[in-house]
Amino acid sequence: MATNFLRTLSQRLTKSKNRSQHQQPRSSSIPRNKETSVRHSHCQCRVQLLDNSDLNILIGKAAMGQELYQRVFAHIGLIERDYFGLQFIDHMQVRQWLDPAKRIRKQLPFGPPYNFRLRVKFFSNDPVNLKDELTRYLFFVQLRQDIQTGFLDCPPEVAIYLAALGLQSEFGDFNPHTYSSTFASEFRFHPLQNEQMELAILRQWADKQLEGMNPCRAEAAFLDKARKLPLYGVDLHNVQGRDGCEYRLGLSPQGMLVLDGRQKIGLFLWEKVQRLDFRGRRLTLVVEEEIQNSKNSQESPQQQLVHLHTFIFQTNSSRAAKNLWKCAIEFHTFFRLKFIGNNGMNRKIFSPLFRLGSTFRYRGRTEYEAINKNNELQYQQPKNLNLIERPPFRRPSRRYPPRQQQQKKEEILKSPVKSLDGGNNFYFNNNTQNGIKRPAMSTEL
């Protein structure tokens, strides 16, 4: 018995030694895969650019948000970076901006890959202040998308003029021999777009006022017209009032708007906002109001009575309330303050809206610094902007199948195109000057 037991034990030991001898050289003979090591130490970020193309960036797992910002901006050759941000959607379906001072992995609940969208975060009050052509073009693309999707409310008559400027920027002067009456139907301009609107867009595009405009001039005219829209540059958030009704709270350079549907019912100027705080889903807004003393109308402003009004709004979640508060801090700091100091990630700008105990601060330059201190505080900008190697940033718009033509092309060129008012004032006619009969009309909407 003992002999058999010892024989069995020795056989097992011999097998285990042979197995270890065979396995050891196999593991040492395989070289370490560099791709595997990179995959373990890096993560993939997918950024959707404003032209709807995707940019894939491999970044370290411990990387801060600022590193991704720098990689994206360097890829597209963006110089005026203060107006833009990277947006993502968290697990509560709240749209948030990537914080450059925090780790990427701690901010996004999903991934890798981590998905972002490059968007305009702060719209300049006056696009003339934008120095770089690429910045103006990105503003132009963002506004076109917002109007097309209905994110930015735009009356149809204004949308017609803006759509014509968009066609002028992309295709140049209108030519009836090249573009048929269904050409505008291949693009999307407005949620209420129909055949009448498309014909009116062609009519506006063929007007003498747009003739000869190069892309830069057409985009500048587009921005000048779009900035006059009531909700231009307004960041809207859904809230609920004390009465249980649904409202939209909009952040603008001037202050905070309150909208009931599409109707503006209130505006709280930033200089009148004394406190903005949140607790859970509740957002508290304290606004001051100066009351004139009827007994002494010549009383100095310092002696006027100040009455404080408190407004309470409910959001869908505590994350939505905190995100609204953070966006309000950034809007107030960027547009309202004129802090001048050393630019850097550790710089913190004071705002009276800060919540006690919160570590959140706006890190970056204010609009005042971006405009007036461009020479001192710049992102290592070359002296000659023409030397910057940029990819071609003007991309063709997405096209759709045209509307079904009921007539032949020869008949369309001779038939009148009805305007929105029902008149036959606009013609595609080969016998007229330049192929177009242009009536005297005002394009000022």
Image (cartoon, helix red, strand yellow):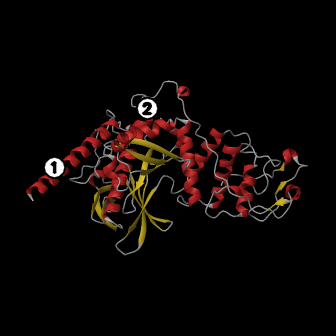
How far apart in space, not on screen, are marks 2 and 1 (Cα)? 82 Å
The residue most toward the top is 383
* Amino acid identity at mark 2: Asn
Q: Secondary structure at mark 2?
A: loop
**Camera-nearest residue between 267 and 119:** 119
The residue most toward the left is 2
Q: Which residue carries the number 2 mark?
A: 374
Compared with 339, 356 (above or below) is: below
Q: Which residue carries the number 1 mark?
A: 10
Percent position of residue 132, x then y: 53, 35
Q: Is residue 253 visible?
A: no
Q: Residue at horizontal 66%, vertical 52%?
A: 163
* Amino acid identity at mark 1: Ser
Q: Is residue 339 left or right of residue 192?
A: left
Q: Residue at horizontal 86%, vertical 59%?
A: 408
Q: Is residue 432 left or right of residue 291?
A: right
Within-10-Å neighbours for mark 1: few <14, some 14–19, many 20+: few
